[in-house]
Amino acid sequence: MIWRSASPACTGVRSSAKFEQGDWTILPSDVPALSNSLVTFDCRVDDILEVGTHSIFVGLITEAHFGESGDPLVYCNGAFASLVPLCAVTPHEVVDAGLSLERKLQ
């Protein structure tokens, strides 16, 4: 699966070796992107907001490229995950999940 071969590029590996796997292309903004991704956005920096010790970059999308339909790559808290279709979840489950997350964040 492509997400397994490309995962080092998506998980914080900080060397040029992360581009040795997968089929990469260079966007007009001169940044690399996976050729067979579901969607690729090319952006330009519109603003940089300094907040505490962090910089938040606000980008304007200059181009969007859409690939074939498929399951998205989701990476969170050091692990890969999949999405549950919204039609498979009841509104009650969404509210319960939101409340659970809110309690964990407090």
Image (cartoon, rainbow, N blue to C red):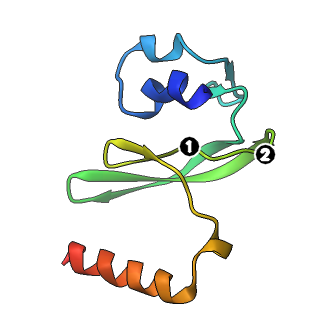
On the rendered structure, is 58 left or right of 63? Answer: left
- Could you tell me the amino acid type at mark 2? Ser
Quadrant showing the C terminus: bottom left
Tag of residue 69: 2
Seen at 64% across and 53% down, the residue is 60
On the rendered structure, is 49 left or right of 63? Answer: left
Circle 2 packing at 10 Å, graded few (<14), some (14-19), many (20+), is few
Is 24 above or below relative to 99? above
Q: Name the residue that disc number 1 marks.
A: 73
**Whole-percent x and y of residue 4?**
51, 27
Nearest the eye: 29 or 69: 69
Q: Please identify the quarter of the rendering in which residue 95 is found.
A: bottom left
Is 65 above or below relative to 30? below
Seen at 39% across and 33% down, the residue is 11
Residue at mark 2 to residue at mark 1: CA–CA distance: 12 Å
- Could you tell me the amino acid type at mark 1? Leu
SS for dot 2: loop
